Amino acid sequence: MVGGRGIHRAVRLSPRETQRAFRCEGCAVIPYLVNLATLIAIFGILASSMNVLLGYGGIFSVAHATFMGLGAYAAAQIALLITPDLLLACLAAVIVTSVFSVCLALPSLRVRNEYFIVASLGLQMVAVAVFTDAHAITGGMGGLVGIPQAELFGIPVGGGFAFLIVCLAILVLNLLIVFVLMRGSFGRSLMAMRDNESAAQALGKNIPMLKTFATLLGCSMAGIAGALFAFYLQFVNVESFTIQQSILIVAMVVIGGIGTFSGPLVGAVLLLLLPSALSFIPGLPAEDIGAVQQLIYGLLMVLLMMFRPSGIAGRH
């Protein structure tokens, strides 16, 4: 199932519980909507970071969940061993993902197109194996539990509206950074590399630097999203960082609009609301929602590639 159990458990909770919540005259609707909005903010950061690689840089990676996981485990260890300070945890996530981003940057310098996709797939498979077996750091299949609620300058911000506001603020900050960078000389050079790498190199563009910085930026943003994800669920394990999660993030960018500013957000909103919407279809068993969801994802991607390859928010 695309997305891993962690995200699906958080988004859908229980379909029947969701239906009951909406019947409860608003008593449980607001917390449910806050839950959805928080996850949309976190995955909006992830999709935007993937858009830096895929949309602006033309670097098609299927290992983005790896860097989300690295950020999540780094933040969880900081919270469990030192302090639940959110800024410190996000800083640790950025440092760890920046260091390991070289594992993605190096293949991108040597191979292109389908060869790089295969290389990133290998990185994703290695990461899952490491996450599963490194019990001392990741907790293995059992994961890390009991992550304390986040604090910001000593003030608890771990639940409800407070954490939603923090996530939205970080989302806006990330989008602002992407907006400024992509409209500057770096962004224009990056898009020139995406459109024709050989021509960009012939014009004097520093391709290795562009790929390395784009990878560093995209992976660091994914690490921050992973840190927020860990604090929000207060539990992380390897099931949230598999190839299915990477495909979900790519699907958000492709369906929303590759290389557009608003496209990743549109994709994140659409794909995270879909499981909840399906739970309201009369007669659809809860155990079949995952299969129907996969069918809709596939159809959406095929139809978009046929009739609107630039995505919902794309120009053509």
Image: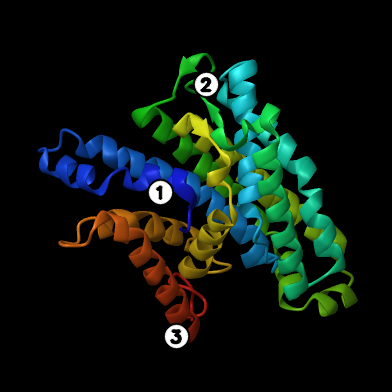
Identify which residue is drawn at 16% across, 62% down.
283
Give the distance between the C-alpha atoms of the residues marked 3 and 1, in whole angstroms: 29 Å
Identify which residue is drawn at 89% across, 70% down.
204
Q: Residue 121 location in percent, x, y?
A: 69, 61
Q: Using the rendered image of the protein, determine whether residue 189 is visible from the camera's viewpoint.
A: no
* Residue position marked by numbered label 2 in the rendering: 152
Identify which residue is drawn at 77% across, 72% down.
115
Identify which residue is drawn at 59% across, 57% down.
243
Q: Nearer the viewer, mark 1 or mark 2?
A: 1
* Residue kind at label 3, given as amino acid type: Phe
Q: Is residue 183 left or right of residue 11?
A: right
* The image quarter in which residue 164 lies: top left
Q: Nearer the viewer, mark 3 or mark 2?
A: 3
* Residue position marked by numbered label 3 in the rendering: 307
Q: Is residue 18 left or right of residue 298?
A: left
Q: Residue 262 location in percent, x, y?
A: 48, 61
* Residue kind at label 1, given as amino acid type: His
* Residue position marked by numbered label 1 in the rendering: 8
Question: Between residues 176 and 118, which one lies in front from this camera angle?
Answer: 118
Q: Residues within 10 Å of mark 2 (few under 14, many from 20)?
A: some
Colouring scheme, one of rainbow, by chain, secondary structure, one colour? rainbow
Question: Between residues 68 and 91, which one lies in front from this camera angle?
Answer: 68
Where disc 2 sits, the SS reads: strand
